Image: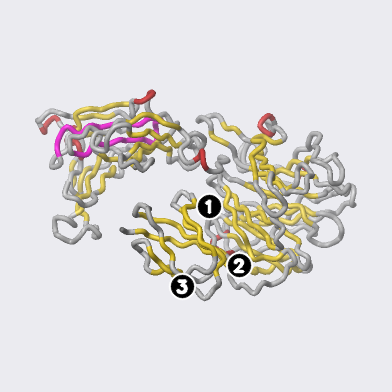
Amino acid sequence: GDGDIDILSFEDGGSYLFLYENLAADENLGLDRLVFTTGETCWGKVKEDGNTPEIEINADSNPANAPCLLFTMLEEGPLATERHSGSTVAAFDGDGDGDMDVVLGDIGTATLVYLQNGGDTDLARVNLVIEKYPQSEGGVNQHINPAAYYVDVDNDGNRDFVSCSIAKESGININHIWYYQNTNTDAMPVFELDRKDLLMDETINIGRYTTPTFIDYNADGLTDILVGNSGYQITSSTRQIGLHLFENIGTESEPAFELVDEDYLSFSSLLEFSSRLAPAFGDLDGDGDLDLIVCDGSSGPSNGDLFYFENKAGVNQPLEFNGYFSEYMDLDPGTNLIPQIVDLNKDGLNDIVLGEVNNTGVAGSFRAVNYFQNIGTVTEPMFGDEENDSPNSNGIIPLESNSVKSNSPYFYQTENELLLFTGTDAGEIRVWNNYNQDTQLFTLKNDRLGNILIGRNSVPAVFDIDNDGFLELLIGNRRGGLDFYNTSYSVEGLDTGVENDFVLEATIYPNPTDGSFQIMTEEKLSKVILYDITGRPLEEWKSGVNYYQVDDLRPGTYLLKVSTFDGRNSIYKLVLAK
């Protein structure tokens, strides 16, 4: 209660809460300083059981009965229990008595527990445990490892309650951000469940490991988007998997996409498919229309198999598939396969390229993007199943240290050259060109396109969807979303002269600002857009503005998107401090 920020966290064993007290206020150092010392080593006189998430408390005044005395004291502190760590902690004044109460989540439970502090700001003592908190509609139930957050969601000045599982792979990832609105005051909160899809109801959420590709599925002349994924984790044992189809309902110059099918081709009913679907289109049987191949992901009985769907529709007709062939040509070089269909050796036959996890884990090795040459005919493709046997190749790009785990290829044939875009495990997008038929290797053109780093497992797809002569870039990722960018790569394959295809140099001054600022750059700007941190546009300025002014906005962090006439963009943080 001294005005600075302390830290409350479990010790390594996961049973006792440690209070790390910030001494900034005590030593008059200013609230921008963080100077911690270990305070209470059994905050609240509470212990979480070593084998279960049960809570043991001692609310009476006799310290001999405190659960903290049940463990051995050493010179360096208490002896850790055998319990795994993995609890989550949120501290706020839930009962309006002026001291901090705590909400706990645990790696072994689906619910949250409220610990009421019956002590005071000097000595915390938990005297009441409420299971299944908040009490509105039975409390949080989120499968595993829920975490609580106390934040003002609706900007009414009263902080609300939000819960979400922090489990990276095993947590539920649909209807998984529960928002409880504070219907009372900030000093005496009362939480009522409002919805279970906070933020997700305004964004694209397709489970995990999104893998996009472009295709005109209904032959209307507008390019649509098909997205593979590893599905929604509905419960601990139930996963809903399916290809998501976004139809272009806009125009040739102004595309707009609408989700029209969450289970395109009814993949969820095909038991052979287990996880992480990755689609690609190309003409494999020489009839002029685009066939479909789908790789099946990182786990399950398929474990990286390739499935072939022949398009029976004909040229310039809506896609029509009649069944599929599993384990196509026995091509299965590894796991987490990302397919592409491309005539890499320019012999008139479409080949297959498969990105995968680099099993060697060694920088400079080649096992990441495998090439399988079509050794059949135009109408009857044939592929050897060993990536190490000529004319195949076990890697058409060398790996650097930050991409040894996985690479996701996407090819685009410009009027002048074949470009290869690859995503990486770390999240960069790389661009390659100048494929050498003799060495079967591409040359690295750009090792981090636009300084983009969108998060783990980036998967690119490119196409000129607005017919402006430049490629657009769509990126999938491990989190299950999609990122969209304009680029300065010409469909003609011409060098635009832009060394870094997205980034433009600009300085925002002053920053932080009280509302008035300048953008100092040598570039001619086409427009500037101000967003809040959720991505909601707030203000837009066209070219010719020298001074920018924002009014009626709350202090905080905002985003400025600065664009030039040649399609380059940069995002800058703007801090508003009034």
Asked if residue 304 is among those painted magenta in the image, a careful observer would answer no
- Would residue 181 appear left or right of 477 to someone viewing this image? left
Q: Position of residue 285 (x, y in %)?
A: 86, 47
Please tell me which residue is depicted at 47% across the width and 43% down the height of the picture: 168
Query: Residue 301: x percent and y percent?
Result: 65, 36
Q: Earlier in the sequence, mark 2 or mark 3?
A: 3
Cα–Cα span, label 1 and label 2: 31 Å
- Secondary structure type for disc 2: loop
Q: Return the x and y of residue 440 as percentages of the image width and height.
A: 75, 65
Which residue is labeled 3 in the image? Answer: 520
The amino acid beneath tag 2 is Phe
Distance (Cα) linking label 1 and label 3:
33 Å
Provide residue 328's location: percent of width, then percent of height.
77, 42
Quarter of the image that includes the C terminus = bottom left
The residue carrying mark 1 is: 456
Is 111 drawn above or below residue 459 in the view shown? above
Residue 192 sits above or below residue 471 on the image: above
Q: Which residues are magenta?
A: 99-120
Cα distance between the residues tagged 2 and 3? 16 Å
* Quarter where residue 403 is shown: bottom right
Q: As shown in the figure, which amino acid type bears the numbered disc 3?
A: Met
| Residue lying at 56% horizontally and 46% vertically, measured from the top left | 481
Amino acid under label 1? Arg
Q: Nearer the viewer, residue 334 or 430?
A: 430
Q: Quadrant of residue 104?
A: top left
**First of labels 1, 3 by sequence position:** 1
- Other-residue count near label 3 (Cα within 10 Å), few / some / many at <14 / 14–19 / ≥20: few
Q: Which residue is mark 2?
A: 565
Residue 518 position (above or below residue 19): below
